[in-house]
């Protein structure tokens, strides 16, 4: 799992924000506002409804987890002479070696198979917050840590044979750094997508919350071979919290859906009462408990550009979970979003995998009016994966999803699911 340390990308000598104009891409977020102009009524919150299995959860979906110790290095603690913290740190570092950073959805029970083989920097990354697919046909992905470090890698899967059970392998491609505003804090959500000019783009945003009602956005062309964005073409934008409550994080995940002439920015916003209000949860509880419903809340929303002034719809609300990962499940015919895969990071309670079904709201003779959210169903990703991997359920905090690449066909055809 070791790899050569890449050279650090050199910052540009100057930075000129890209203005929004007549020549701008239709997916441009320069001087735009994501999360603004909320229309329609806010639906009542869903609780957690269990399912035996999720037949709509795509096998091979790539998952990232926010594991990795943020403790001081052992050298620093040794120099400080703090023997107690040094012992604790050694234990944390040893545990880090078995904690998953990247995995795939292995079956309809939500079991995740961690990726443990390979030299990809993502396998040792600290606090991965999001992951995007760069190329499905080549199974190339980029995962981003909260410090803005990007890890680009390629996934392989070896077919099982009489000599080999088959395993997943992550090959290192590159590393890069996302620039953020001075003093902006952590990167919370990113998404890699293709714009209307066939340019590979990266959009990223901060967490917001913490008494702030908004966050910033940045968008720029992305070169996965170098792992960097074009800092001379960065577009500056803003994102506001759809709940209006500063205790809610403005963004916890993001997906971009391009379906001309409409461009949709889907995102989630979460409330973590254990962090904001000191609410206490124990491992004996689950996401259906009254304590969890009071501590964790989430909103799924989308902002639409391309049909007049931009508008934001709150699609669904949830109690008992923090939705930190979403994946849009689209119809292969009209490319419209038919459902959303949900992944939660519920701290000591673990992580759930859910599917949020969607249906167009139609009025006879008047066309479509937004989306209706049906009752979502969930399986216990963390608990089911714990039985398969022996990793504690609290260490399966899902933080990002990306679509299955070509490697997934080897899993399905290999008879492993």
Image: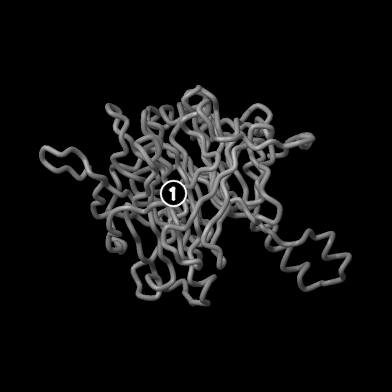
Task: Report if residue 328 is visible in the image.
Answer: yes
Quadrant in which residue 108 is drawn:
top left
Label 1: few (<14), some (14–19) or many (≥20) C-alpha neighbours in 10 Å: many
What element does badge 1 sit on? strand
Quadrant of the drawing holding the C terminus:
top left
* Residue 117: image location, x then y, percent: 60, 38
Q: Is residue 10 left or right of residue 91?
A: right
Q: What residue would you read off at disc 1?
A: 267
Front residue of 245 and 133: 245
What colour scheme does the image use?
A: one colour
Q: Is residue 300 above or below residue 140?
A: below
Quadrant in which residue 376 is drawn:
bottom left
* Residue 8: image location, x then y, percent: 78, 37
* Residue 283: image location, x then y, percent: 46, 71
Q: Is residue 93 left or right of residue 65?
A: right
Residue drawn at point x = 35 percent, y = 72 percent: 289
Q: Is residue 62 above or below residue 373?
A: above
Front residue of 195 and 277: 195
Task: Report if residue 382 is visible in the image.
Answer: no
Residue drawn at point x = 56 percent, y = 46 percent: 217
Residue drawn at point x = 80 percent, y = 60 percent: 74
* Residue 248: image location, x then y, percent: 48, 64
């Amino acid at each position: 799992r070791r790899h050569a340390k890449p050279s650090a990308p050199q910052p540009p000598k100057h930075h000129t924000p890209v203005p929004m104009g007549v020549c701008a891409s239709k997916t441009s977020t320069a001087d735009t506002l994501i999360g603004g102009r909320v229309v329609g009524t806010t639906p009542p919150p869903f609780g957690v409804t269990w399912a035996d299995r999720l037949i709509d959860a795509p096998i091979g979906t790539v998952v990232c987890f926010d594991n990795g110790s943020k403790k001081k290095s052992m050298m620093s603690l040794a120099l400080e002479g703090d023997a107690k913290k040094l012992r604790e740190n050694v234990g944390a570092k040893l545990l880090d070696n078995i904690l998953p950073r990247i995995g795939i959805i292995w079956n309809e029970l939500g079991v995740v198979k961690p990726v443990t083989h390979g030299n990809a920097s993502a396998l040792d990354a600290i606090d991965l917050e999001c992951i995007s697919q760069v190329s499905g046909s080549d199974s190339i992905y980029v995962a981003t840590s909260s410090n803005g470090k990007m890890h680009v890698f390629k996934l392989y899967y070896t077919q099982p044979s009489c000599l080999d059970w088959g395993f997943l392998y992550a090959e290192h491609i590159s590393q890069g750094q996302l620039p953020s505003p001075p003093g902006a804090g952590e990167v919370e959500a990113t998404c890699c997508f293709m714009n209307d000019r066939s340019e590979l783009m990266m959009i990223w945003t901060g967490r917001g919350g913490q008494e702030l009602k908004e966050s910033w956005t940045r968008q720029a062309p992305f070169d996965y071979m170098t792992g960097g964005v074009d800092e001379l073409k960065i577009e500056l934008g803003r994102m506001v919290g759809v709940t209006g409550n500063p205790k809610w994080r403005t963004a916890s995940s993001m997906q971009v859906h391009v379906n001309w002439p409409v461009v949709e920015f889907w995102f989630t916003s979460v409330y973590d009462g254990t962090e904001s209000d000191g609410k206490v949860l124990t491992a004996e509880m689950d996401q259906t408990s009254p304590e969890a419903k009071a501590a964790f809340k989430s909103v799924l929303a989308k902002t639409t550009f391309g049909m007049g002034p931009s508008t934001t719809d709150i699609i669904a609300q949830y109690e008992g979970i923090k939705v930190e990962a979403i994946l849009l499940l689209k119809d292969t015919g009209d490319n419209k979003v038919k459902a959303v895969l949900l992944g939660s990071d519920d701290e000591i309670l673990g992580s759930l995998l859910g599917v949020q079904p969607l249906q167009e709201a139609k009025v006879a003779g008047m066309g479509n009016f937004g989306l209706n959210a049906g009752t979502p169903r969930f399986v216990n990703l963390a608990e089911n994966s714990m039985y398969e991997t022996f990793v504690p359920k609290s260490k399966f905090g899902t933080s990002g999803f990306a679509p299955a690449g070509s490697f997934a066909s080897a899993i399905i055809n290999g008879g492993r699911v």
